Amino acid sequence: MTLLSPEVIAVLMLDGILFFFASLAFLLSLRIVLRWDERATTPLQYTLQKQAYLVATVIAFIFYLKLPLFLFFIYTLDLLSNILPGAMCAAGVTTATVYGMPLFGLKIANLYLFGLWLAAHRIDMGYPTMPYTRVKFLAYLLLFPLFVAEEALELLHFFGINPHVIVSCCGTLFSAAKSSAVSAFVSLPLPVTLGSFYGLFGLAVWAWRKQRPLLSALANLLFVPVAILSLIAFFSTYVYEMPHHHCPFCLLQADYRFVGYLMYAFLFFGTFFGMAVWLAKRMGYEGWRKWLLFSLIGDFLYVALVSYYPIAFYLKNGVWL
Amino acid sequence: MKNLFAFALGSLLRRGAKNLFIFVIFFLMVFVLASVFMVTHALKKEMFTTLSALPQITVQRIVAGRQTQIGVERVERIARILGVSQALPRVWGFYYFPRAGVNYSIVGLESFGQQYRADLQKAADLYVEKLAAEDVMIVGPGVKKSLAEHFYPESFLFVKPDGSLKKVRIAGVFKPQTVLESNDLILMENSLVREIFGMDESMATDIVVRVPNKEEIPTVARKIREIYPDTRVITREDLRISYQNVFDYKSGIFLALFIVAVFTFFIILYDKASGLSSEEKREIGILKALGWKIGDIMRVKFFEAAVISLTAYLLAVTTALAYVFMAQAPLLKHLFTGFSVLKPSFALSFSVDVGTLALIFFVTVPVYIAATLIPSWKAATLDADEVIR
């Protein structure tokens, strides 16, 4: 049985539209990569230059729609947890099929990649000759299969969910007891988890002080998984004020004032610019210092927000969980 | 950026008639969609309010796949299961009144006894003396009205299964928080209900079980199933899921059909936006000759699309709010509640959530903007020298 929830239909429809445009952009970029010659004065080159605009606009459209759509996707999963027996938040719905977790990872990775592509495009447009055009569209050709994989996983996931099969709740999925990939990190000693979390943040701050784009990119790249794992292992328990509730999804529910949306927005903003700054420097973009500062602000807001919960808990109760 | 936006606004106003046409169609589409989702949402909320007042577990006896009466003696056994704080037999049923063509729900209550619902308890406390002393009933406002229309202002003559008549006086009108389920409700003393339906003293319609700890509900339900294999045990969670599914199904089907309409609109819009008049072409040519880049013109086109779709969205949602909650969604409400003489006279209580608004937004506005992408690119890449010539 397939789910006929209006939210699922909406997500699938929009992804259908995005797929149509992404395929169009793929075909056009294929031609651009093969035939682009900036010194040529042929009608073909002239047409390609025009089409490059269309491709870039389409990709921008995809990215700017994917960004809010990703939030809506999580919201949809949260709603579905009302129907699936056993699920209490999006975690259970995500693991309802084997495709759920890869889908989630791929969705996040694609957001970063499309964003980086757009950043590169913006920088490239700043030069009169658009020197990176070919590389840019080649990159999109590599990006497209990932996008198709995401769409395919999403279809498999939504049509694979069986509303009569009991799924796991986040309480069991992220517990330290079970021997899953995540539980290994949950049971990691606290100093290691927190040390790497604040250490990487420190590294990002240092990269800003010393104005080192490569260091910033590396620190932020590592910061994403470490931040999420430390959120599961440590910080989330203080948000829920429950020592055994490790979950990155329940944060997004009304019970916790949707604070998760804010956290993930800060994290994305900070780490995205942290990585993009390296690209900007490599492409010779003047404004990269500003991006480094954006990254620092985003990272700082994220760290401040997640650190607030344990500190506030300690101040109120005088003990750690 | 600001100037481009101002230019886009000006350009929209200059071509008012053409844009108005698109605006009106888009407005109507969003309006219909928003109204349907708001009605669904309000009904869903009403249902869930009702649901939270229901007992945690309902036990029915099934014979040959049909629900039948259940023996009252089972209450004792169920009440002894650990975790159960209360088990009560319920006596209730539907009474068909042919002249009005309606079904009344007759619910029995035990005066001086505990009720399984707070609102019933309140009613029982209020009328306990009367209910115990004589043959009276408390009725919902809809029942009161339909009885009065058929010349039963004070009392009603029930026809018992053997054909004899039973006169029952109306003692009061029942007004609980949700009108949806209580409009057709009649409350009476248990023994009176049994008499009207011709039921045995030792029988009840079903048994409701209260379990204070939510975590224990599945276990208790399983135990009841094991003790009495001929019963169907329904938990509140089961009901909630099936309600959710019914509403999702209805609005899902609607949305699936609606998407066809959205794509038709998409094509109309695509066509409209592609067919530039010679005047528009000239304008673009002049702008390009003045030094506008392709990106600038595309940006203006994007602003135009965004302004039209967003204002239409906002206006449509506001109108839908007024239509659904102030005008009580004439026509549309019956799609979900069905035609029944007593049911429709309830009010949709105001409830909007961000999720519904986001859903409406996502199936309309991005589609609109997507439809204008390629036409605006085509317009922006027109050659200046060709169009001005």
Image (spheres, helix red, strand yellow):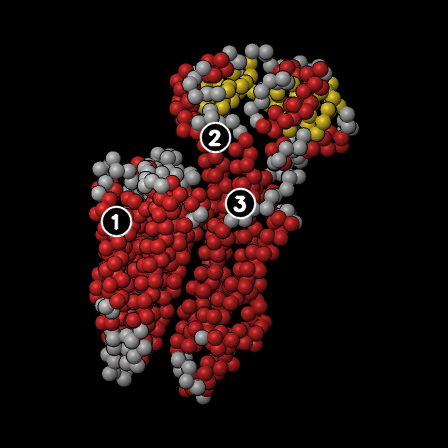
Residue A286, x across and y down, in percent: 29, 76
Amino acid carrying mark 1 in the image: Leu
Residue A177, x across and y down, in percent: 25, 35
Q: Is residue A213 left or right of residue B219?
A: left
Chain for mark 3? B
Q: Nearer the viewer, residue A261 or B200?
A: A261
Label 2 environment density (alpha carbons within 10 Å; few <14, some 14–19, many ≥20)? some
Q: Is residue A257 left or right of residue B126?
A: left
Q: CA distance from mark 2 to mark 3?
A: 20 Å
The residue at 47%/26% (across/down) is B212
The residue where tag 3 is placed is B41
Q: Nearer the viewer, residue A35 or A116?
A: A116
Q: CA distance from mark 2 to mark 1?
A: 43 Å
Can residue A82 be seen here?
yes
**Element at label 3:** helix
Chain for mark 1? A
The residue where tag 2 is placed is B236
> Which quadrant holds the N terminus of chain A?
top left
